Image: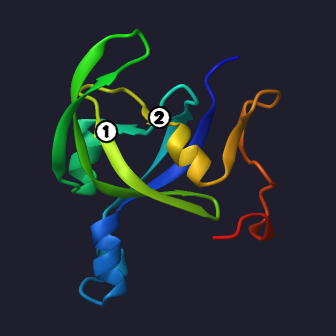
Amino acid sequence: MGATYAEITLKNAFDETRAREGLIEERDVRSVTVHAVADTGAMSLVINEELQKKLGVPTVNKRFAQIANGQRVPCEETDPVNIFWKNRRSSLPALVIPGAKTVLMGAIPLESMDLMVNPVTQEVVGVHGDSEESFIF
């Protein structure tokens, strides 16, 4: 089975809160749409330094992360990032892996949005379907 990609939109969670409160315009919310690898072997959301800068999410913690080859690498953890896939949303800190070439959407954001990787079609799908009625907050 090869890599499974999903188009997701990442938004600065603090910006979204400020927009809801009327402190900034919705158009000023920093966001980016990317093709992310849906990686059930990863735990969290992984971005690189460039995306961190575009989203304007600050580093709140430094830690180590184990990457696919087993190596432990230093990384930064950010303030929450809102993740959107179709009609679904999740919010969690991102891990910033220096030089990461792809965005990874790991098990935690997949689970929190009730998503899975269909091994036959190699697509991200809703565990209980993809209609708006199949996912209740």
Residue 78 screen position, x and y as percent: 25, 49
> Is residue 135 or residue 98 the one in the foreground?
135
> Which kind of residue does numbered mark 1 sit on?
Leu
Give the image quarter of residue 40.
top right
Where's residue 13, x and y in %? 34, 65
Answer with mark 2 or mark 1, whichever residue precedes in sequence: 2
- Is residue 78 toward the left or the right of residue 47 in the image? left
For image coordinates 83% across by 27% down, the residue present is 120
Along the line of sight, the residue nearer the viewer: 80 or 23 = 80
- Relative to 128, is 34 on the left or the right? left
Quadrant the C terminus occupies: bottom right
Q: State whether residue 23 is above or below residue 102.
A: below
Element marked by disc 2: loop
Q: Which amino acid does label 2 sit on?
A: Met
Instruction: Tell me the distance, in whole angstroms, between the alpha carbons under discs 2 and 1.
Output: 10 Å
Q: Which residue position is annotated with label 2?
A: 43
Numbered mark located on residue 95 in the image = 1
Disc 1 on helix, strand or loop? strand
